[in-house]
Amino acid sequence: SGLCVVSTPARFMTELSVELDQPGLVIPFGDAERLVTEVMNLYQDEELRIRLGAATRRLVVERYNWSKVVKDTIGKIESMLNREKI
């Protein structure tokens, strides 16, 4: 199971491209009324919480699993080392 993400616009969250049918909800900075509305919607709608939570989990497992993180990190380090050799 996963948790639904509720966030303000941040680089990481825009990367997740969250919309209502995606892994989470992005609330504009300072929009407290919308934040309350969206959190209450999630509180009252179990199916929505489950669907968004499952989508978040799938996305995180696909993009941010340890195997991928290690592979990407090694690739970046090798790239930096190759640039220093030039």
Image (cartoon, grey):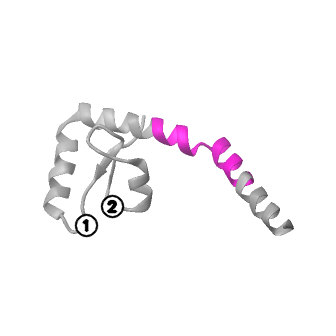
Please report the residue visible at 17 percent of the width from the left and 64 percent of the height from the top. Answer: 32
The quarter of the picture where residue 46 lies is top left
> What stretch of residues is rendered in magenta?
58-74
Is residue 10 shown left or right of residue 61?
left
Secondary structure type for disc 1? loop
> Label 1 to label 2, Cα distance in Å?
7 Å
Mark positioned earlier in the residue sequence (1 or 2): 2
Please report the residue visible at 20 percent of the width from the left and 57 percent of the height from the top. Answer: 35
Is residue 52 shown left or right of residue 46?
right
Is residue 50 shown left or right of residue 30?
right
Please report the residue visible at 25 percent of the width from the left and 57 percent of the height from the top. Answer: 27
Q: Amino acid at mark 1?
A: Phe
- Tags 1 and 2 touching, CB below 8 Å: yes
Q: Amino acid at mark 2?
A: Pro
Does 63 lie within the magenta span?
A: yes
Please report the residue visible at 75 percent of the width from the left and 58 percent of the height from the top. Answer: 79
The quarter of the picture where residue 43 lies is top left
Tag 1 residue: 29
Tag 2 residue: 9
Magenta segment's dominant SS is helix
| Numbered circle sitting on residue 53 | none
Is residue 64 shown left or right of residue 19?
right
The image shows residue 71 at horizontal and vertical percentages of: 70, 46
The image shows residue 65 at horizontal and vertical percentages of: 59, 42
The image shows residue 15 at horizontal and vertical percentages of: 43, 52
Secondary structure type for disc 2? loop
- Residue furthest to the front in view is 86
The image shows residue 83 at horizontal and vertical percentages of: 78, 65
Tell me the quarter of the image containing the C terminus.
Answer: bottom right
Mark 2 closeness class: few <14, some 14–19, many ≥20 residues within 10 Å: some
